[in-house]
Amino acid sequence: RKEVEQDPGPFNVPEGATVAFNCTYSNSASQSFFWYRQDCRKEPKLLMSVYSSGNEDGRFTAQLNRASQYISLLIRDSKLSDSATYLCVVNILKSSASKIIFGSGTRLSIRP
Amino acid sequence: DTAVSQTPKYLVTQMGNDKSIKCEQNLGHDTMYWYKQDSKKFLKIMFSYNNKELIINETVPNRFSPKSPDKAHLNLHINSLELGDSAVYFCASSQDRTSGSSYNEQFFGPGTRLTVL
């Protein structure tokens, strides 16, 4: 089983729709969680951190479920500019060393 | 001003050659990284390095070696290039990565697309 798994998509949704996708992780020593966004042929950029209590940043909401070992990203009122690949990132703390693992990404395409 | 820059942007070379990719960051960060993103878009960390510690992903062949002339630079040298080395290589930096510390946001360079023929 991969340490971090995401549905590759693509998710193809109309502008204005709400879309959500999950990311599961296998290592219970996972300490911190993030969503990055990567546009086509560009570098990844941090979208938001994921806090235990869940957090919101404008149209974006991130949730963490430690019991089931997954994080989620919800995008409301989607815009054309939201089209990108969304990467789940997990930081595992093991023996005082951090290990950073990126998921393979979920591709999102917003259509007019 | 570019925060993390890489050169070259594109690199096409023959199998068996030795090549280098340069990376520079002007953010004053302590830690730099190299990632490989293959054709399936999987982004895998290859190295993380600060002035105290080099951590190598155990799956990285020893043909790959990072060289850091100073805190702002981390270059990637690749010897005896193979077809499977074709990928996009990203450099990144973060403020600090002391052992046991929380993750710090990583800032990525624009990537170097390496094609081995």
Image: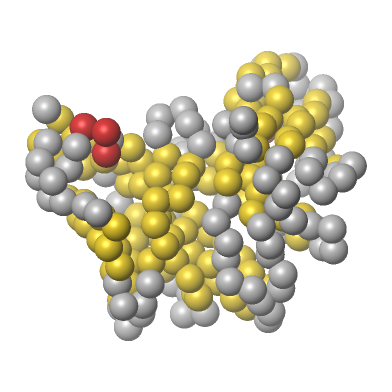
x and y percent of residue B81 in the render? Answer: 76, 29
Q: Quadrant of residue B12?
A: top right
Q: Quadrant of residue B31?
A: bottom right
Does any portion of residue A36 appear in the rendered image? yes
Looking at the image, residue A16 lies above or below residue B104 = above
| Figure disc tally | 0
x and y percent of residue A108 in the render? Answer: 26, 40
Residue occupying the far right of the picture: B69
Residue at 48%, 71% in the rendered image: A32
Does any portion of residue B59 appear in the rendered image? no
Which quadrant: the C terminus of chain B? top right
In the picture provided, is B8 more to the left or to the right than A45? right
In the picture provided, is A70 more to the left or to the right than B37? left
Looking at the image, residue B30 lies above or below residue B103 = above
Q: What kind of colouring is applied to the model shown?
A: secondary structure
Taking depth in this image into account, of B67 and B30 the one nearest to the observer is: B30
Looking at the image, residue A28 lies above or below residue B23 = below
Which quadrant: the N terminus of chain B? top right
In the picture provided, is B63 more to the left or to the right than A1? right
x and y percent of residue A22 in the render? Answer: 28, 60
Residue at 53%, 46% in the rendered image: B43
Looking at the image, residue B43 lies above or below residue A71 = above
Taking depth in this image into account, of B96 and A100 the one nearest to the observer is: B96
Residue at 79%, 57% in the rendered image: B50
x and y percent of residue B108 in the render? Answer: 58, 42
Residue at 63%, 38% in the rendered image: B3
